[in-house]
Amino acid sequence: MIRWFAVVFFALVLLSGLTPWLHKLGFGRLPGDLRFRLFGRDWDIPLASTVLLSLAASVLVRVLSR
């Protein structure tokens, strides 16, 4: 349980650090990514970007495990 918490925490820290670089590449602006303003704050829900990054990570793990 603690190990999964550490992995998720590390992934979130890494993703938040890479967010500006990923926005330059177009992540967060793909069709299927939601962006709206609510209560005076901009909200981003990157559904398509999350699926694409998950697919890329899956392929990377599969290639490295061979």
Image: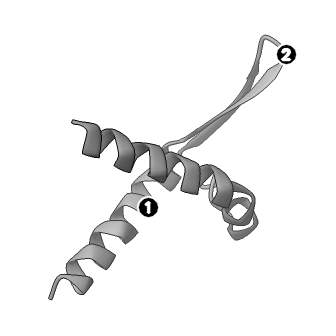
The answer to which of marks 2 and 1 sits earlier in the sequence is 2
Of the pair 55 and 63, the residue shown nearer to us: 63
- Residue at horizontal 48%, vertical 43%? 47
Image-quadrant location for residue 21: bottom right
Q: Which residue is mark 1?
A: 52
Q: Position of residue 46 (x, y in %)?
A: 56, 44
Compared with 50, 63 (above or below) is below
Label 2: how many residues lie within 10 Å, few (<14), some (14-19) or many (20+)? few
Of the pair 61 and 31, the residue shown nearer to us: 61
- Furthest-front residue in this view: 2
Assign a secondary structure to mark 2: loop
Q: Position of residue 29 (x, y in %)?
A: 67, 53
Q: Position of residue 28 (x, y in %)?
A: 64, 51
Is residue 31 among the parts visible in the rendering?
Answer: no
- Give the side of residue 23 with respect to residue 54, left or right: right
Q: Position of residue 36 (x, y in %)?
A: 72, 28
Is residue 15 among the parts visible in the rendering?
Answer: yes
Q: Which residue is mark 2?
A: 40
- Residue at horizontal 34%, vertical 39%? 5
- Give the side of residue 37 with respect to residue 19, left or right: right
- Residue at horizontal 65%, vertical 60%? 18
- State the mark number for residue 29: none
Amino acid marked by disc 1: Leu
